[in-house]
Amino acid sequence: MNHILKRKLKFYTKESLKFLIISFIAIGIISAIILIKYKPIYKVKLANNEIGYVQNKKEFEETLKDNIQKTCNGKVIDNITFNNEPSYELSLIERNQKISEEEVLTAIKQEMQITYQYFEIALDGNTVDAVNTKSEAEDLVKLLKQENSSDNLDLSIIEKYTQNENDVKTNNVETVKVAMQNKIEENKIIEQEKKEEEERQNAIPSINGIKLAVTPISGTITSRYGAKSRIRKSTHTGLDIAATKGTPIKVVADGTVTCASYQGSYGNLVKVDHGNGVETWYAHTSKMNVKVGQKVLAGDIIATVGSTGNSTGPHLHLEVRINGEHVDPSLYFYK
């Protein structure tokens, strides 16, 4: 009995192996026929819409990455997102069917949102230039502080992100270094000029807080305040400065014209109220360029030198009055 069972088991085993061998051969033949006519390839989809085929998914993704880097012109990419994520599906297509990976590449790039990263370098809170990486920015700031250690520079690094490639205006480190150093030197000049202007302003005489910023004319002092003369009954209430007829007369400070008319012995007289009780008078003028009520700024030409009224020749009679009382102009001008 056992002998018969063994023979049957051997027979069925042989038949099974024979069937498997035939099946493998058949599958091989069918596969060969399929591979002769068809080729395996990756179908690419965006939002379930077929956009084309690529030969090798991994190689294509590397090509896509390299292409993005090339088109970014060295700009640093922080991340890439897709409006629609591409999907890859292994498929078979006829071997003679043409494919265009460039078209797939273009379609995928149109779905991408690239975020760029760069680093601005600022001096006193104002951006001067930018570099691509944080390490470049940190090294440059450190170097600039070392080279300008005595200036206590306010340098800062501003991390920036954008999806607009045109916003990324970076330069190489050497170019940025030159730009930063130029800006540092420019700021030094500006600070020095500001300091000199403050010193100049502090040196400008003032009356009751009114800065007397401008000298009316250049000329020769012919009669000082308090002087006596045969042509006047009392002592001199102003300062006479001789100059050529027609010489422009400048107002000494901002103010409002309160008089611009002929006033007896003063001749053509211009009065300007500067506020805080301060007035200046300009007498004997040949021509008056302003009208009552007109606002004037320090340095404006309000009249020209003449010899009108009680005068012995072309000159400016300058008076300074505080709360209606005349004071010596040489306390402030022509010392």
Image: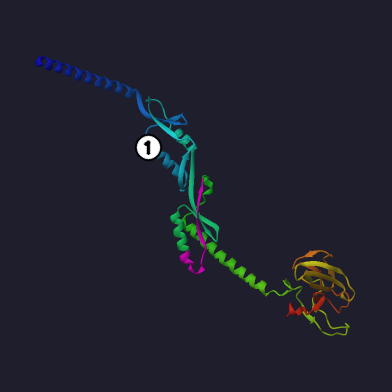
Q: Is residue 181 above or below residue 205?
A: above
Quadrant showing the N terminus: top left
Query: Is 134 situated left or right of 325 in this image?
Result: left
The residue at 53%/45% (across/down) is 164
Residue placed under numbered mark 1 in the picture: 59
Amino acid type of the residue tagged 1 in the rendering: Glu
Q: Is residue 56 above or below residue 93?
A: below
Q: Is residue 288 magenta?
A: no
The residue at 37%/37% (across/down) is 59
Residue 83 in percent (x, y) is at: 49, 37
Residue 159 in percent (x, y) is at: 49, 53
Residue 269 in percent (x, y) is at: 85, 72
The magenta-colored residue range is 145-162
Give the color scheme: rainbow, by chain, secondary structure or one colour. rainbow
Disc 1 element: helix
Q: Is residue 125 above or below residue 168?
A: below
